[in-house]
Amino acid sequence: MTDLAGVVSRIDRKGSRLKVLALASTIAFAPFSAIADTDSKAQVFGTPSNLPLTLSGSYLSGRLAGFQKDYGHAAAFYEETLAADPTNTMLLERTFLLKLANGDVEEAVHYAGELENAGLQNFLAQLALGGQHIVDGNYDEADQSLAKGRNGPLAQLSIGISRAWSLYGKGQADEAIELIDNLRGPDWFEVFKATHKAHLQFAAGRNQDALETIEGAYALDQAAIRVVDAYARILAANGRQQDAIAALDQYDQQFRGHPKIEQTRAFLESGSVVPPMVSDPAQGMAEILYGLGAVIGRDGGEELSTSYLQLALHMDPTAEFAAIALGSVFERMEQPARAIDAFMRVPDDSVLKREAEIQVGLNYNALEKVDEARSHLEALIEVDQADLEAVIALGNILRSHEIYDEAETVYSQGIDTIAELEPQHWLLMYFRGITRERLGNWDMAEADFRKALELNENQPLVLNYLGYSLVDQGLKLDEALEMIKTAVELRPTDGYIVDSLGWVYYRLGRYEEAVRELERAIELRPADPVINDHLGDAYWMVGRRNEARFQWNHARDLGPTEKDLPKILDKIANGLKEPSVTDAAKADSDNNGG
């Protein structure tokens, strides 16, 4: 059965990617190229330095690196090509954007200036130039750069809010607020406009105006932590401390809390003056860049997202949310080394630092650096043994590498810190149950699974794992089958759980029902080798031998585990020699009067 709750180990394909890029460069050196060689020598991707780097070679390698989202090498190749063809505006634009996406912001600003000098309209170049002026405190120059404006909703909102902060830096708060009011765009503009207008008003000491404005943003989006945080701070600044705490309570109830909310609550309860979230123009521009960059990253626009987030961190190196968002984008891009670098940019005094450090440990594991992952997370737990997120992360890493005894110890130590188990602790009990089952301690594993169900009734993952394990051992078959059926009802589109139901029918000798459910599972998870293997077995048992071998061949090609591959190969060669009714199937037959 597939381990649904295991840590998914993401493979960093950097090594193979570099080989492909080097090959592309070498191919491009061929004499058929009609473009003259440059004087540069290849110094990247391990290409021999005695080979001339051609314009076409650099361009093709840059494109390939860009497709692979390897922004650093892509930028280097485009920059090399641009040096050979400095009037090529396409090369100039790609070099700028890739430098920005890679975090080489100062170099990107230089190329942004070149784009402006060439008369090219690029809103990211405009943001980079304006942002650098704001960082330098040159608000007049920033206003001039940003005042040119660009078409398109994203450009208009990004530049408009950024320019408002440059006006605020010039001491023109009224003009800044008016500029935000006059921004026109789709409905999603409104929460950004209202939030930044409130930030400006609060920073300018206009607390009552800020409250009226932030109430509008809060009404639009009570799930956005930055909106909720700003709302609570501004309420408190207007003498409404209890209302502020009530807003934080509501967020906690709906979204299970957040370290930033806890920090603001501590400020409020201490009676201290709660400062504005944003107090200077660089922070303000970084805030809009983070807000938009994080949303873009979730929608798959990685190059644009990283550009926004890298510029946000250049504007405000303490922008903890931007660092977290950037790390998350790199995780989705399966670039764990870059994710680690991003998470490490969260400041040491940030309340998000431990969350970032946990992600660092997980990304070490994604790099197959298990020792580094273990030592990193162990250090966090040593500081705070009740940090259950760190406990779960370490336990899951150990379990994913089949180090079950140590994983059980880690989970148990975390559970021992809990005075009274609450519903959210079902996950810890579930993970420890899996570990104990793998260690062969079934009685203790079953107790953990049943405790998890007490804490979270009808939790489909637990029902699936417990039910399958019971059937696999021929125990409590009626109850076990009902558990898995319930899990399927709760998660009808979860291919792994549907596979469990099909495989249980198979183990019970109910092969036609097994085929039906396993075919459903394949539709949901067509690329899973285990499910394909299971369906092959079921086909064989109902006499569909050609289809069985097809599924086994497909399972073989999908990369099964080293343990499963020999079994699959044997079935391809020899089939299943005999039905082999299991004890569980016999027991089922007995239970039904067979």
Image (cartoon, rainbow, N blue to C red):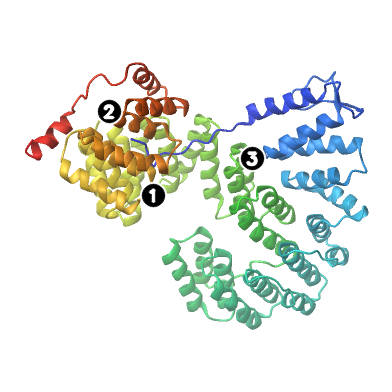
Q: Amino acid at mark 2?
A: Gly
Nearer the camera: disc 3 or disc 2: 2
| Rendered position, 67 above or below 160 | above
| Position of residue 208 in the picture relative to residue 78 (left or right) | left
- Residue 117: image location, x then y, percent: 93, 54
Q: Going 82% across and 23% down the picture, which residue do you hit?
A: 29
Circle 2 residue: 543
- Distance from disc 1 to disc 3, alpha carbons, whole Å, reads 33 Å
| Position of residue 109 in the picture relative to residue 445 (left or right) | right
Disc 1, SS:
loop
Q: Amino acid at mark 3?
A: Arg
Query: 318 or 36, which lies in front?
Result: 36
Neighbours of disc 1 within 10 Å: few (<14), some (14-19), many (20+): some
- Residue 419: image location, x then y, percent: 30, 53
Q: Going 47% across and 29% down the picture, which residue do you hit?
A: 558
Disc 2, SS:
loop
- Residue 586: image location, x then y, percent: 13, 31
Which residue is the extreme one toward the left? 593
| Rendered position, 226 above or below 434 | below
Circle 1 residue: 493
Point out which mark residue 338 bears: 3
- Distance from disc 3 to disc 2, alpha carbons, whole Å, reads 51 Å
Q: Amino acid at mark 1?
A: Thr
- Residue 509: image location, x then y, percent: 20, 33
For the image, the number of numbered tags is 3
Q: Quadrant of residue 201?
A: bottom right
Res. 413 visible in picture: no
